Amino acid sequence: MDRTLKQAYALLLAFEIFSASVFPPKLTLPHRHKKECIEKRVVSLMTPELFELKCRLKADGYDISSAIEDSRFRLYWPEKSKVTKDAAKPSGNFYLSPDFGFYTELSFEQAVKYYDKNRKWLEKAEKVNNISGAAEYIVAIHQIESNFGKKTGKKPVFNSLASMYVQGKRKKFAYNELKEFLSLKGKIYNNYFQIKGSWAGAFGNSQTIPSTYKNYYKDFDNDGVANPYSTADSIGFTANYLKSCGFEESIKKAIYGYNRSKRYVEAVDVFAKELKKRIKPKQKTNA
């Protein structure tokens, strides 16, 4: 983009932001959603920040006009993290508390069943990535992240990332991830609101963000698509990512690369070691 075009773009952006602040148009919002929006503190106006996002993305080749005019579009206020709040209490690691539901007998029973059912993919993941002993850690991560795909999030990833940008928190991260997400249209989704995940834009069984998905997800079961909701593909992704984070050199360092929380690392490590004791030896299968 030459200097003249940059100046023209800057003037257009300034004008649109000014117009939005003086005459903020309302987004299309059916009457049936009004109560829901009030209860969830959803922003229902086109803010200057949203106009800025729209213009920046358009300059990068992504037109989100139809998406932000869609009745499914929402801008959410930040949510308080229960884990962060409770983990700071003197009682210790919230991830390992009965309230969180991760380190429980039921959780271990589910993990053993998951391991046995997917032993083929877990063994293949270890072999392909040359990370011996990673199977139990992969299972532990899938348990704590999404309860093996049962809890992958309910907020459209598009909405979550747009909200993060508009809020001004981690703005650069949100913009880059939103671009990565938009680049996936036609590959893993057909409409902007199809992929749902967490408030931070993580989605799928492994709770990955768009850029990480693009870099590390593989079509592990060879069905033609790297599906973030596929058990096999998610196992392949987690193994691939742990390898990239140095699993062979340091298990805890690799887990920290997955989630930068010392309590998370401790919880996954403790769970995986206990799970290993509960897994019955079985003849190796051919992946």
Image (cartoon, rainbow, N blue to C red):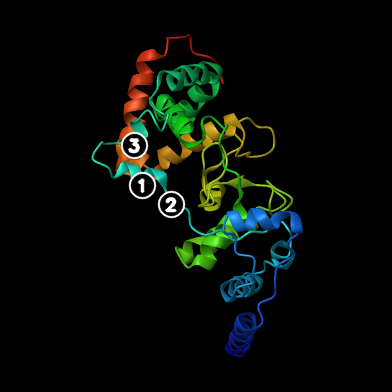
Label 2 sits on what residue type? Lys
The answer to which quarter of the image holds residue 232 is top right
Q: Which residue is mark 3?
A: 94
Q: Looking at the image, which residue sits at the far left?
A: 90
Up-down relation of residue 21 to residue 4 (above or below): above
Q: Which residue is mark 1?
A: 84
Query: Residue 26: x percent and y percent?
Result: 70, 71
Quick one: quadrant of the C terminus?
Answer: top right
Q: Is residue 43 left or right of residue 259?
A: right
Up-down relation of residue 258 to residue 66 (above or below): above
Asked if marks 2 and 3 touch (Cβ < 8 Å), the reply is no
Q: Residue at x 52, y 61 (%)?
A: 164
Asked if marks 1 and 3 touch (Cβ < 8 Å), the reply is no
Up-down relation of residue 272 to residue 79 (above or below): above
Q: Is residue 221 left or right of residue 246?
A: right
SS for callout 2: loop
Q: Which residue is mark 2?
A: 80
Label 1 sits on what residue type? Thr
SS for callout 1: helix
Label 3 sits on what residue type? Phe
Query: Residue 34: x percent and y percent?
Result: 69, 58
Q: CA distance from mark 1 to mark 3?
A: 9 Å
Q: Nearer the viewer, residue 267 or 230?
A: 267
The answer to which quarter of the image holds residue 46 is bottom right
Q: Nearer the viewer, residue 254 or 46?
A: 46
